[in-house]
Structure formats: structure tokens, C-alpha cells
Image (tube, helix red, strand yellow):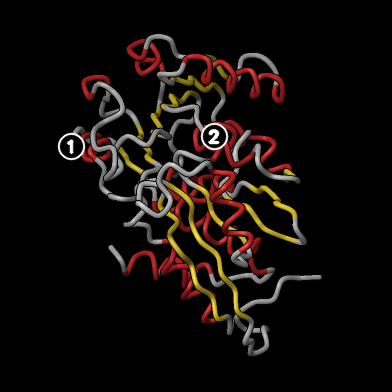
Amino acid sequence: MPALTAATSPKLSRVLRVGLVGAGIQSSRSPAMHVAAGRALGLDLSYDLIDTDTATWEGLPLETVLTRLEQAGYAGVNVTFPHKRAALGLCDTVAPSAAAVGATNTVVFQNGRRIAHNTDYSGFAAGFLGGIGGRDLATALLLGAGGAGGAVAHALVDHGVKRLFVHDTDHAAAETLVAAITARLGPGRAQVAGDLRIAAAAAAGIVNATPVGMLKLPGIPMDPALIEARHWVADIVYVPLETQFLRTARAKGCHTIDGSGMAVGQAVAAFEHFTGLQPDAARMRATFDSLG
């Protein structure tokens, strides 16, 4: 059955409760995007922030958090740093999108079961392809092999990057991600970047998929001296939209891609999973931009 759109959907009075589980998420733009999209489709939709840094949720096992939300009648939740990998193991059914990257950012509660999806992959791909233009994709350096990094890595190699260097302070995580890409696409498409100097010198572009740069974790994920004007530079962090990483790269003359495209793209797909309806992507983008 095709998804309904804002133009074809009947007037609805359906009440839907969803939210976001993560740490330090008070500045998230997701609530506004989802509520506006729901209202346009006739949904009485609420989107709550379940911040595991706050007194209400701090220290609770993620399993307990998800169980409480299910019991409260939530239709599902988005999941962000640092819970994406842990949440995957707490789900009953894992969609191919989540299985491929080993993490979930969208959990749907349905008939007493938890279904894990991952919309980071498609969200990043949409933002990246919209911003990269015709620039060199022969090689790229990915910083971060965690829950978001896995989705970004697969999106990069599936959308033009021929050779991907993967760096993470957790060396085992980088090795696991490289192994997953190799198993899927064959040898030579990804390798662990042991020395950032060598990897940065070889790469045409650099992508930050770590949480470094968020309001909660300010800073820059690599030595800025390694960023050169010839690099294109992308960041998945969107609060703040202008991270220190992007600001430094832009000052050197780099082409930059901020995290807004991924933030909106993953939200559009997550909304469809929660509601079964197709939101107006342009409306969600406009809502996102209005909060800047």
C-alpha cells in the first residue's frame, strides 16, 4: 500500500507519541520537525526528549528506559549518542538497514515487539550527495566507527568513495567496521587509518562521524594542521551547525558540508517508520532551518 502524503491523507485525529533517547539532547531540533510534519497530516503527535543525562533517566539501564516508554504507549523512539549500538541488541526484529551498520537510530514499538531500523544511512547519503557536487571521491578519511560512523561509512562507499580510511580511538571498532565493508564489497575498499597524518595526506575528503563538536562534547576531532585547502570536509554534528571542525576547514578554503542534510533526511525516514505516512520533506527542512 503506498504511503499517504500531506495532499492525499484524510483529516486524522490519531494520537501518536514518539521521542528521542540520548544524552545531552536538549537542543535537538527533532521535536519541532516531527510535530510540524504530524500536524500537517492531521496527527496529534507529540515528540518527547528522553535525555539520559537528566535526573529522570540518568543511570537507568537502556532496557528499562525502552520498557518504560513501551508501557507508556509510545509508538517508537529515535535513538542517538551514545545508545545506538546498545539499542540494537534490545530489539526483537532488526531491519536490514540496521543490521547492515550494526546500530539503530529508530526503534518502532509494534504489537509487543521492538523493530530496529537505521535511517542514518539514507539521511547522510541524501545530505552528502546534495552537498558534494562533482568533487573527488577517490579516497576519504572517516573519523568515528561508532553507531553513526557505521552508517556513514557504508553510505560513503555505496555513493562514490572508492577507498575509505577509518579512524577511531577504539581501534577494535575501526577494525570491525572495515571488516564489515570488506565482507560486503571485497578487499581494497576500506582500511584502518592507523596514522592520521598519512591517511589525511592520502584522502581527498574528511568526514567527522564522532560526537566531538557537539555542545556536550566541544572541540575538534583531529589535529587541524592535517586539514588542507584541497580537502572537502563534512560533519554529521548539527548542534551546533557550525562546528569548530567545519569552521577551521572553511577558514582554510575547504568545501564543507554541515550536518543539516543528515538531520533532516533521517527524520523524514524515521517519521515514515513511526506513522506509516510520508511527510513533506521540504516542510521538515523549513522547520529545521527556522530554528537556526
Percent x, y of residue 276: 69, 68
Apparent side of residue 62 relative to residue 180 in the rendered image (left or right): left
Apparent side of residue 194 relative to residue 10 in the rendered image (left or right): left
Residue 150, quarter of the rendered image: top right
Residue 113, quarter of the rendered image: bottom right
Is residue 99 placed above or below 76 in the rendered structure? above
Q: Quadrant of the N terminus?
A: bottom right
Is residue 29 placed above or below 93 in the rendered structure? below
- What is the spatial separation of the Cα atoms under label 2 and label 1, in whole angstroms? 25 Å
Q: Residue furthest left?
A: 251
Q: Quadrant of the C terminus?
A: bottom left
> What residue type is disc 2 on?
Leu
**Residue closer to the observer: 122 or 253:** 122
Is residue 234 placed above or below 196 in the rendered structure? below
Label whose residue precedes the other's in the sequence (2 or 1): 2
> What residue type is disc 1 on?
Ala
Q: Residue at x 60, y 38 (%)?
A: 103
Percent x, y of residue 44: 55, 81
**Residue closer to the observer: 284 or 29:** 29
Tell me the crowding category of disc 1: few under 14, some 14 to 19, or many 20 or more residues within 10 angstroms, Cα based: few
**Residue closer to the observer: 195 or 172:** 172
Q: Which residue is mark 1?
A: 251
Percent x, y of residue 173: 53, 20
Percent x, y of residue 137: 49, 30
Q: Secondary structure at mark 2?
A: helix
Q: Residue at x 44, y 53 (%)?
A: 261
Apparent side of residue 275 relative to residue 191 in the rendered image (left or right): right
Q: Which residue is mark 2?
A: 156
